């Protein structure tokens, strides 16, 4: 299995993932890798051809693909590595990733990981909508993919359940395509998505919206033929007598988004049952050290711009974490017992530890020398520190301190050795 | 082709029809299997509780009792030959509260009379130990080690495939409309695709077996009533009940049970309500409520928020209350199987063997084919393989390295393979049932566009011709007018 080692691996290349990769790189992380299961960078942004992106970050009104491109350009400019068509199958708490890329299994070791898998749409099954199970029931995002990416219409006469942003945007989009949107029904007494979408998509295009209504039945054996709507009471129960049959060939669902955390769980990340996303600290680090999370995988945001900001935050801290890891793991020195040294502790020493304060080496000699000796600490054959003892005996431990100012002398060395020699 | 005479025509490619076809494929017979739907196993066989029953429930002396116990014993070999998922993990009938406890004794007695093996009474404490989520009011349970679970659609598809491998002819979207008769003898089947002469007809028409009986010329008031069963499916990441748990039975059904499946999902159901429409597999708010209440009785901790799907199936409930299995005198050349409801899936291998025996007695001379191959080879399931096996598979065919369904880890290679088998999947649902694609928590949200693309390519049809479950269920309507960017 191919081995790869990275400072930061970002899973997902939507707004959160792109921002996290950029921030990690800018913080100084060296090998930053984005893993994306789709065939292009940008995540769901690439099928969001409507405008409304970038108002906060760029003070410009951009489409989803335009917004994504700004970050994709920076990712490329910074030299972030990307793997497309690659799906992460497993993550261990030790930050080892197993992924599959165009028919190739990969094993990647990451010093830090940013989870940026986004969210998925709530499905019909999760709502347990009664009725038949014909063709013609799609989530709004799937319909969006059909139209914007595949270039096909999933139906001609639509009813839409839920008034989330994707649902409202798709309602308008369907009108542009010459389809009819018979009705949007929302179980709550208010619209689910942004007011601006309500105005620009529903009001401006005369799409009828019924609040406090839901779909209580689906009719049609092969293809949807109608849905039955009903008004609901304060407990969301259908009010008998309020049923209305709405002829249509398609039911779109825009009934909420669920953070996609199946991978997070495999890594041992603990999830908050209220958000469906990981518990995070102020750096967006999860309970698993070195695993960060950003964007809709944590909780569902209103605006892509805010997801981007969350990505920056997580990416910056993931970068920092990776840098510390890198220093720690690659600059540990072996401490070796040289002439007339039986053993010396610690066995390994992190030179960075000298930044925090003096470090003590403890050793015993192999044979006694009843005369003054030097205790020499050497790095790559060069003397770092020496100390005199009037005599040495195996029964008496010798201690020698390396002060912080010795840090510079041992940087770059592979090992430290300690030896005891008689003063001549 | 319509002029060629078949020795046997089987009407209906559900589990009974397909296992019968497979059993007959062992002999030198020209066998034609007719199915009106676009795929095999789309009736009761695909929408049930997936249980291989031990046999303590049916009334002693009935066909149900006899064929249940006989059928149960045949599943290990069947699963081994046909390579479908089957686990003989045993099941429990759980009594809640002291008043239900005596019913366990009745089941025990019935089981003894029916010849059920592996029964054991266990205490409430033992039940709580074995299933920590069980209702704390549990008063005892009947544990039966011979109970099993399977993937029922996989059973049907594998049986059909093995039958076709052994020269059975399968015609889909072919509906039996009437019979050609010479006197009292059936000599042909009239279908929407022409008339097929034959020597014997086997009625495996499930919900429509009463209609076929009358068309064949049986004068009977026998009637099939569709009895609906509704179900919940839970997300296996959230709910993991690792047992098969029945409540104590009611007079008309085995009650709302909660069971694990061979795929690790927990399901709850079914209801049992007689309805009129033989095609009405809709789920109802009342039915779902009943399922949930019944399931909560066994496992009070179940949460509706963890549901990922609901479905309903129809039992072919016969007016006699028992399986009708006969070679009637009034009509010649006709083997009649009707009212095969639960435990029909369990019994199906034994019923198929009974048909062979019946033909042996009444029908054409049965001569074994020396080259009959009972093995339906398994196809690789990417998610079940070790990383090393996955690597090898991908190396042999890179399509196995492209994951189409993320929740259930189904690859393009598996989908393509299912389109090019002896019993090919030609619809989205056909792919779904064979691979589990789209059955996970996102319920097809991500995979549907990709599957349409793959089916269109492999079947050489336009994407707008790809269907969910046959003609009339097209998934797309037309190309979009506006391609590319559009500022609003």
Image (cartoon, coloured by chain):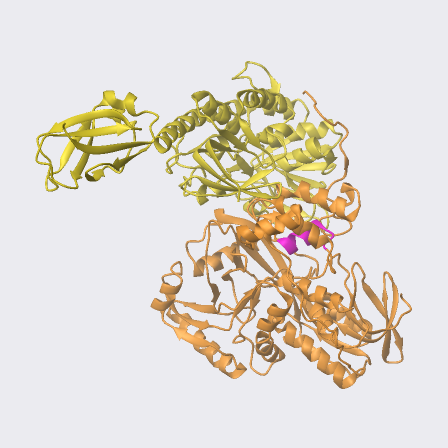
Chain colours: A yellow, B orange
Magenta-colored stretch includes residue B341: no
Q: Does the image show residue B115?
A: yes
The percent position of residue A308, horizontal first and vertical second, equals 50, 24
Q: Nearer the viewer, residue A36 or A177?
A: A36
In this rendering, the answer to whether A207 lies above or below B488 is below
In this rendering, the answer to whether B76 lies above or below A369 is below
Quadrant that contains the N terminus of chain B: bottom right
Residue at far top of view = A59
Judged left or right of residue B177, residue A186 is left
Q: Nearer the viewer, residue B177 or A18?
A: A18
Residue at far bottom of view = B361
Determine the main secondary structure of the stretch shown in magenta: helix
Residue positioned 68% across, 40% down in the render? B449
In this rendering, the answer to whether A309 lies above or below B321 is above
Based on the displayed image, in which of its 4 quarters is residue B369 positioned?
A: bottom right
Q: Nearer the viewer, residue A211 or B33?
A: B33
The percent position of residue B311, horizontal first and vertical second, equals 60, 54
The percent position of residue B54, horizontal first and vertical second, equals 53, 73
Quadrant that contains the C terminus of chain B: top right
The percent position of residue A372, horizontal first and vertical second, equals 10, 30
Residue positioned 42% across, 56% down in the render? B300
Q: Magenta stretch?
A: B425-435
In this rendering, the answer to whether B362 lies above or below B278 is below
Residue positioned 64% across, 58% down in the render? B379
Residue at far right of view = B3
Q: Nearer the viewer, residue A176 or A95?
A: A95
Judged left or right of residue B47, residue B298 is left
Q: Does the image show residue A191?
A: no
Residue positioned 15% across, 33% down in the render? A399
Based on the displayed image, in which of its 4 quarters is residue B74 positioned?
A: bottom right
């Amino acid at each position: 299995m191919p081995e790869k080692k990275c400072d930061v691996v970002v899973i997902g290349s939507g707004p959160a993932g792109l921002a996290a990769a950029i921030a990690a790189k800018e913080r100084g992380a060296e090998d930053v890798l984005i893993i994306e299961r789709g065939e292009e960078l940008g995540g769901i942004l690439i099928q969001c051809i409507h405008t409304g992106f970038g108002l906060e970050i760029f003070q410009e009104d951009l489409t989803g693909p335009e917004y994504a491109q700004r970050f994709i350009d920076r990712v490329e400019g910074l030299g972030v590595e990307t793997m497309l068509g690659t799906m992460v199958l497993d993550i261990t708490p030790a930050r080892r990733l197993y992924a599959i890329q165009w028919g190739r299994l990969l094993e990647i070791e990451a010093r830090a990981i940013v989870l940026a898998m986004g969210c998925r749409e709530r499905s019909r099954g999760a709502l347990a909508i009664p009725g038949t199970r014909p063709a013609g029931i799609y989530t709004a995002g799937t319909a969006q993919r059909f139209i914007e990416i595949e270039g096909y219409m999933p139906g001609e006469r639509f009813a839409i359940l839920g008034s989330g942003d994707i649902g409202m945007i798709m309602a308008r989009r369907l009108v542009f395509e010459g389809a009819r949107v018979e009705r949007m029904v929302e179980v709550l007494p208010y619209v689910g998505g942004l007011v601006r979408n309500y105005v620009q998509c529903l009001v401006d295009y005369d799409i009828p919206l019924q609040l406090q209504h839901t779909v209580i039945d689906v009719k049609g054996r092969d293809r949807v033929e109608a849905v039955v709507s009903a008004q609901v009471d304060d407990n969301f129960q259908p009010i008998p007598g309020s049923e209305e049959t709405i002829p249509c060939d398609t039911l779109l669902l825009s009934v909420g988004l669920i953070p996609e955390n199946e991978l997070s769980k495999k890594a041992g990340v603990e999830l908050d049952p209220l958000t469906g996303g990981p518990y995070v600290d102020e750096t967006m680090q999860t309970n698993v050290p070195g695993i960060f999370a950003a964007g809709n995988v944590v909780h569902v945001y209103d605006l892509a711009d805010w997801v981007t900001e969350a990505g920056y935050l997580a990416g910056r801290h993931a970068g920092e974490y990776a840098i510390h890891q890198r220093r720690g793991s690659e600059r540990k020195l072996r401490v070796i017992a040289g002439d007339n040294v039986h053993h010396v502790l610690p066995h390994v020493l992190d030179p960075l530890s000298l930044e925090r304060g003096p470090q003590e080496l403890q050793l015993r000699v192999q044979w006694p020398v009843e005369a003054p000796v030097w205790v020499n600490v050497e790095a790559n054959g060069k003397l770092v520190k020496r100390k005199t003892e009037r005599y040495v005996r195996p029964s008496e431990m010798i201690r020698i301190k390396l002060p912080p100012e010795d840090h510079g002398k041992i940087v770059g060395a592979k090992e430290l050795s300690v030896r005891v020699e008689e003063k001549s | 082709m319509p002029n060629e005479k078949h020795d046997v025509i089987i009407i209906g490619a559900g589990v009974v029809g397909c296992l019968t076809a497979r059993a007959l494929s062992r002999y030198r017979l020209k066998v034609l299997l007719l199915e009106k739907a676009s795929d095999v196993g789309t009736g009761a066989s695909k929408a049930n509780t997936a249980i291989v029953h031990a046999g303590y429930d049916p009334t002693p002396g009935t066909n149900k009792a006899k064929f249940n116990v006989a059928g149960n014993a045949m599943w290990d070999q069947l699963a081994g030959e046909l390579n479908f998922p089957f686990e003989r993990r045993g099941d429990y009938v759980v009594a809640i509260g002291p008043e239900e406890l005596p019913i366990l004794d009745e089941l025990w007695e019935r089981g003894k009379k029916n010849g059920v093996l592996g029964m054991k009474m266990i205490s409430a404490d033992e039940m709580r130990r074995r299933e920590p989520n069980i209702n704390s009011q549990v008063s005892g349970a009947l544990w039966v080690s011979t109970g099993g679970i399977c993937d029922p659609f996989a059973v049907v598809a594998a049986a059909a495939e093995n039958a076709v491998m052994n020269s059975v002819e399968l015609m889909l979207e072919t509906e039996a409309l009437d019979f050609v008769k010479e006197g009292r003898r059936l000599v042909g089947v009239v279908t929407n695709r022409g008339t097929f002469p034959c020597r014997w007809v086997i009625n495996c028409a499930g919900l429509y077996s009463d209609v076929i009986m009358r068309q064949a010329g049986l004068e009977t008031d026998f009637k099939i009533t569709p009895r609906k069963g509704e179900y919940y499916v839970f997300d296996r990441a959230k709910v993991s009940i690792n047992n098969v748990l029945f409540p104590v039975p009611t007079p008309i059904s085995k009650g709302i049970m909660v069971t694990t499946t061979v795929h690790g999902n927990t399901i709850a159901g079914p209801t049992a309500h007689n309805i009129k429409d033989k095609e009405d597999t809709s789920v109802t708010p009342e039915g779902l409520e009943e399922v949930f209440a019944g399931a909560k009785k066994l496992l009070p901790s179940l949460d509706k928020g963890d549901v990922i799907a609901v479905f309903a199936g129809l039992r072919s409930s016969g007016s006699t209350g028992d399986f009708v299995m006969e070679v009637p005198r009034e009509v010649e050349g006709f083997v009649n199987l009707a009212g095969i409801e639960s435990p029909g899936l369990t019994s199906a291998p034994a019923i198929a063997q009974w048909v062979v025996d019946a033909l042996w007695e009444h029908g054409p001379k049965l001569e074994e084919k020396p080259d009959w191959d009972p093995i339906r080879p398994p196809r690789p399931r990417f998610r079940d393989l070790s990383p090393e096996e996955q690597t090898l598979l991908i190396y042999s065919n890179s399509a196995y390295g492209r994951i189409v369904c993320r929740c259930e880890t189904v690859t393009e290679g598996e989908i393509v393979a299912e389109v090019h088998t002896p019993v090919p999947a030609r619809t989205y649902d056909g792919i779904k049932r064979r691979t589990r694609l789209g059955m996970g928590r996102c319920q097809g949200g991500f995979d549907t566009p990709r599957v349409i693309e793959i089916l269109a390519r492999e079947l050489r049809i336009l994407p707008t011709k790809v269907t969910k479950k046959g003609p009339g269920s097209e998934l797309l309507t037309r190309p979009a007018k506006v391609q590319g960017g559009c500022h609003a």
